[in-house]
């Protein structure tokens, strides 16, 4: 009698279990906090590059030492980003969202206490959590938008996500503005501390996020499988439109190079890495390229950078909108091809500041803008079991691209090549080729095993 009662209670419990329902308020709250977290992650990321010359002057570091520190930080960021990927799939999306913005706060605060180059490399490596913010955002919001009760966001998910990704140019401009205002008043230490407080507030707010229903189903499935109820676990996953864990490769990173994931992992990785050649040349050292390679005055170069970041925000929104209509893969590829062409024309045929401004801005519009479609496309390429690992892995390769581009440009300049030639080959060439590579990716609709989680409710 007791066993029957227990069995009945267990069956009742299984029948009553449901993953989170995602309301209109939940969706918009998640979107808003994702945007703010990305803005301040970018603020911290860009602020370090902006103020590194000030730190170098303060500590008496040579240009070569500063470059070495910057490279070491990029390597550390890459390693932290790699470690984060499997963690996102293991601890859940909600906790990962809190972790990334907490990493931004910690990195900013710890940087303010810098006293030695090795210490600086260590604390700036923690900023790899903030750098991975966009990948974790894409993972979480992709799943949330799939199941939200907000039909408007569900229909226009790419466009809505593009507004979140638009936090990049907002963060860049915020870093430039606040550094110019506060660095003379509170120094570089105070400038980093200023970015800590908003990040802490956002981390607290994110504790109110709901966990992704897809991840909850996956965890429930794993619990049943551990109890030896494998058939029930598989049925549970299928009833919610998810691929059973029993059919997935166990190792998170191994799964990225297996079956349907292999092609997109390899090609997305190559394309992302190559496109960061363009990011390095036209964003990280964009002022140098404009002044030394194209003869633009420094004051005009700063104005161009402000204008171009405003244009980049419009580019994010435009490509997010277009991606919802013609497909994200084609949107990304065509955008990067056009970006490469615009940069090449700027470096070869332009005469005068007006032509440089127009082509440089168009280049950033088409090179940076497609990232709003790219991050969402990356998340769509993987299943719930490895989506966090996949998006953070591809995203981490951007750091490899930046390091590689810097090394190639440095080697070309050392061998006697002009900065204009280096920018053309590395920046414009890398951007154009990355667009060609994207065309080789498998469209998401062609996948036979992707878990199209359009409605996480029992079938």
Image: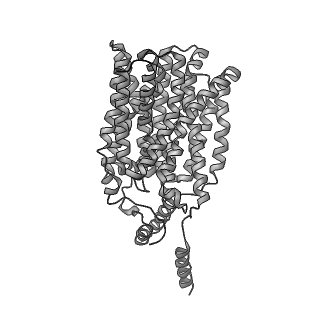
Image quarter of the N terminus: bottom right
276 relative to 303, above or below: below
Q: Which residue extends farthest right?
A: 185
Taking 240 as reference, is 392 above or below it? above
Res. 333 visible in picture: yes
Please provide percent x and percent y for residue 237. Answer: 43, 66
Figure disc tally: 0
**Foreground residue, 20 or 342?**
342
**Along the viewing direction, whichever of 201 and 349 lies nearer the viewer:** 349
Query: Residue 337: image x %, image y %?
Result: 34, 36
In this picture, is 47 found above or below 438? above
x 67%, y 24%: residue: 181
Towards the viewer: 205 or 319: 319
Q: Residue furthest bottom?
A: 1
Q: Quadrant of the C terminus?
A: bottom left
Front residue of 350/193: it is 350
Q: What residue lies at 50% left-to-right and 39% top-to-bottom?
A: 314
């Amino acid at each position: 009698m007791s066993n029957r009662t227990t069995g009945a209670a267990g069956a009742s419990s299984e029948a009553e279990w449901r993953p989170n329902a995602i309301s209109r308020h939940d969706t918009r709250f998640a979107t808003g906090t994702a945007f703010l977290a990305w803005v301040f992650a970018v603020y911290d990321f860009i602020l370090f590059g902006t103020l590194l010359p000030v730190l170098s002057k303060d500590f008496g570091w040579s240009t070569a030492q500063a470059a070495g520190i910057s490279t070491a930080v990029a390597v550390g960021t890459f390693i932290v980003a790699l470690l984060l990927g499997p963690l996102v799939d293991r601890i859940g999306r909600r906790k990962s969202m809190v972790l990334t913005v907490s990493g931004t706060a910690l990195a900013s605060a710890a940087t303010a206490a810098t006293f030695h180059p090795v210490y600086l490399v260590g604390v700036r490596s923690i900023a790899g959590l903030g750098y991975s913010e966009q990948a974790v955002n894409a993972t979480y919001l992709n799943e949330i938008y799939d199941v939200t009760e907000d039909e408007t966001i569900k229909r226009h998910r790419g466009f809505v996500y593009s507004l979140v990704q638009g936090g990049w140019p907002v963060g860049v401009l915020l870093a430039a503005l606040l550094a110019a205002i506060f660095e003379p008043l509170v120094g570089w230490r105070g400038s980093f501390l200023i970015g800590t407080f908003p990040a802490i507030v956002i981390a607290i707010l994110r504790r109110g996020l709901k966990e992704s229903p897809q991840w909850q189903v996956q965890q429930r499935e794993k619990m049943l499988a551990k109890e030896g109820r494998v058939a029930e676990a598989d049925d549970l996953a299928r009833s919610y439109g998810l691929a059973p864990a029993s059919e997935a490769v166990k190792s998170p990173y191994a799964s990225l190079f297996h079956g349907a994931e292999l092609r997109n992992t390899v090609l997305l990785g190559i394309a992302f890495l190559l496109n960061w050649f363009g990011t390095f040349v036209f964003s990280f050292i964009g002022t140098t390229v404009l002044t030394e390679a194209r003869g633009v005055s420094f004051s005009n170069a700063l104005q161009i950078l402000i204008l171009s970041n405003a244009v980049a925000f419009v580019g994010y929104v435009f490509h997010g909108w277009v991606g919802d209509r013609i497909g994200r893969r084609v949107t990304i590829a065509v955008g990067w091809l056009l970006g490469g062409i615009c940069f090449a024309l700027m470096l070869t045929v332009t005469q005068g500041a007006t032509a440089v401004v127009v082509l440089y801005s168009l280049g950033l519009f088409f090179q940076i803008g497609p990232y709003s479609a790219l991050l969402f496309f990356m998340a769509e390429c993987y299943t719930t079991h490895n989506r966090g690992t996949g998006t953070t892995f591809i995203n981490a390769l951007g750091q490899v691209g930046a390091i590689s581009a810097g090394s190639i440009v440095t080697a070309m300049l050392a061998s006697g090549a002009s900065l204009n030639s280096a920018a053309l080959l590395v920046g414009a060439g890398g951007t154009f080729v990355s667009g060609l590579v994207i065309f080789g990716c498998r469209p998401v609709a062609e996948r036979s095993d992707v878990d199209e989680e359009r409605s996480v409710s029992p079938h």
